[in-house]
Image: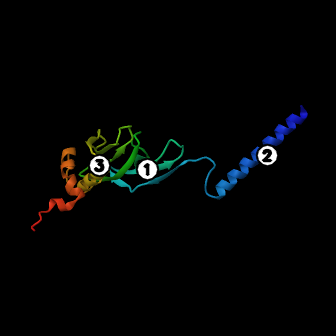
């Protein structure tokens, strides 16, 4: 029985040395033994005395892919999520006339995505503008940044051919 105990002790020592060496090698190469999400912050915007921005993270556990979360940072505090919702694709927030506009594709299991723009004023519940896709998100956020109103889904769909092919909207004189 003494031989068996010595064998297990030797195995544990070798395993501990292996994990220590593997950890040191991973650290020296700038990584880790266990995957963790890599994060990046998109450009910040000021609204109601706080800083707002999207924090994008990718990786981590195999089930978690790209996800975005709207973050808020009040003066003297650490950034924290505005809410617990996750987004798969986003556009930079826009501040206009005391309102904050932000949008993207909300991760909620909706087939084709739940594309939307939300308008928040004074931290009141957001007004939601549903959108058909990413093209509409970019188009409507550009409209907001030029102080134009968000269009309805019907208006967006009726203008889609002109957006995709501008020649359609011009009259041919030949």
Quadrant assignment, res 138: bottom left
Residue that lies at the very extreme toward the bottom in this rendered image: 174
Q: The N terminus is located in which quarter?
A: top right
Q: Position of residue 169 (x, y in %)?
A: 15, 59
Foreground residue, 22 or 125?
22
**Structural distance between the alpha carbons of marks 2 and 1:** 41 Å
Q: Is residue 11 visible?
A: yes
Proximity of marks 2 and 1: CB atoms separated by less than 8 Å: no
Q: Position of residue 118 (x, y in %)?
A: 29, 44
In the rendered structure, find residue 55 and report the number of the disc placed on it: 1
Q: Nearer the viewer, mark 2 or mark 3?
A: 2
Quadrant assignment, res 121: top left
Left or right of 12, for residue 134: left
At x 21%, y 54%, the residue is 161
Local crowd at mark 1 within 10 Å, few (<14), some, or many (≥20)?
some
Q: Nearer the viewer, mark 2 or mark 1?
A: 2
Mark 2 highlights which residue? 14
**Structural distance between the alpha carbons of marks 2 and 3:** 57 Å
Mark 3 highlights which residue? 101
Q: Position of residue 39 (x, y in %)?
A: 49, 51
Left or right of 4, for residue 136: left
Foreground residue, 37 or 153?
153
Q: Earlier in the sequence, mark 2 or mark 1?
A: 2
């Amino acid at each position: 029985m003494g031989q068996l105990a010595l064998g297990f002790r030797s195995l544990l020592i070798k395993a501990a040395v292996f994990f220590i060496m593997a950890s040191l090698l991973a650290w020296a190469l700038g990584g880790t033994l266990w995957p963790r999400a890599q994060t990046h912050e998109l450009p910040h915007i000021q609204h109601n005395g706080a800083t707002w921005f999207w924090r994008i993270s990718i990786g981590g556990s195999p089930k978690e892919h790209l996800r975005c979360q709207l973050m808020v940072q009040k003066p003297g505090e650490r950034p924290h999520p505005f809410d617990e919702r996750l987004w798969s694709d986003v556009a930079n927030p826009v501040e206009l006339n005391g309102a904050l506009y932000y949008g993207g594709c909300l991760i909620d299991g909706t087939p084709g995505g739940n594309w939307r723009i939300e308008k928040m004023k004074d931290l009141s519940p957001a007004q939601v503008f549903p959108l058909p896709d990413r093209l509409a998100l970019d188009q409507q956020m550009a409209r907001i940044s030029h102080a134009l109103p968000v269009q309805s889904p019907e208006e967006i769909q009726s203008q889609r051919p002109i957006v995709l092919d501008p020649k359609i909207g011009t009259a041919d004189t030949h």
